[in-house]
């Protein structure tokens, strides 16, 4: 089983869509963490994402870019991504974020956008 704690292993203040929006963006999460973790999974293994430990909440731009971006940039199809992700939280308020992540992934169109990194050159 693979576990990733966003608040402790990525950022305690995840926000923004792109690298240019600052540290803790959805693009940074997707490109440097989520993609890597999903690539490391064995067949039929899931990645458990801990949503509420050391995090107050998430903006829609972070969730859309971080999770649905996996589909829209053609890294993985939505059904496979949804089957690979499991969400964990002890605060029931975070069920809302799981629902939104699943919604954004489900609405994403596979390989519909050509990915162009927003990180400034040399950064």
Image: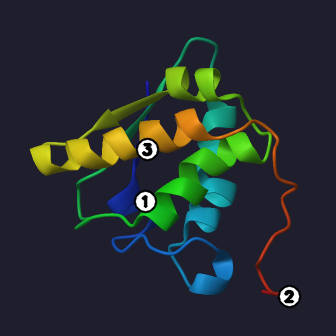
Find numbered disc 1 in the image and state the secondary structure of the residue it sits on. helix
Which of label 2 and label 3 is nearer to you? 3
Residue 62 in the image: x percent, y percent? 49, 64
Q: Classify 104 as above or below 86.
A: below
Give the quarter of the figure containing the C terminus: bottom right
Q: Classify 96 as above or below 54.
A: above
Residue 77 in the image: x percent, y percent? 70, 28
Find numbered disc 2 in the image and state the secondary structure of the residue it sits on. loop
**Distance (Cα) linking label 2 and label 3:** 31 Å
Residue 122: mark in rendering:
2
Q: Earlier in the sequence, mark 1 or mark 3?
A: 1
Q: Is residue 91 visible?
A: no
Residue that badge 3 annotates? 101
Residue 54: mark in rendering:
none
Lateral position of residue 44 relative to residue 10, left or right: right
Residue 9: mark in rendering:
1
Q: Classify 120 as above or below 41.
A: below
């Amino acid at each position: 089983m693979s576990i990733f704690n966003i608040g402790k292993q990525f950022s305690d203040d995840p926000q923004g869509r792109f690298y240019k929006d600052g540290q803790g963006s959805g693009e940074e999460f997707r490109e440097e963490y989520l993609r890597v973790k999903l690539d490391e999974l064995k067949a039929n293994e899931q990645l458990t994402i801990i949503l509420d430990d050391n995090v107050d909440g998430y903006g829609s731009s972070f969730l859309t870019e971080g999770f649905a971006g996996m589909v829209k940039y053609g890294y993985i199809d939505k059904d496979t991504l949804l089957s690979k992700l499991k969400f964990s939280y002890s605060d029931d308020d975070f069920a809302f974020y799981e629902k939104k992540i699943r919604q954004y992934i489900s609405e994403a169109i596979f390989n519909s956008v050509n990915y162009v990194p927003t990180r400034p050159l040399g950064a």
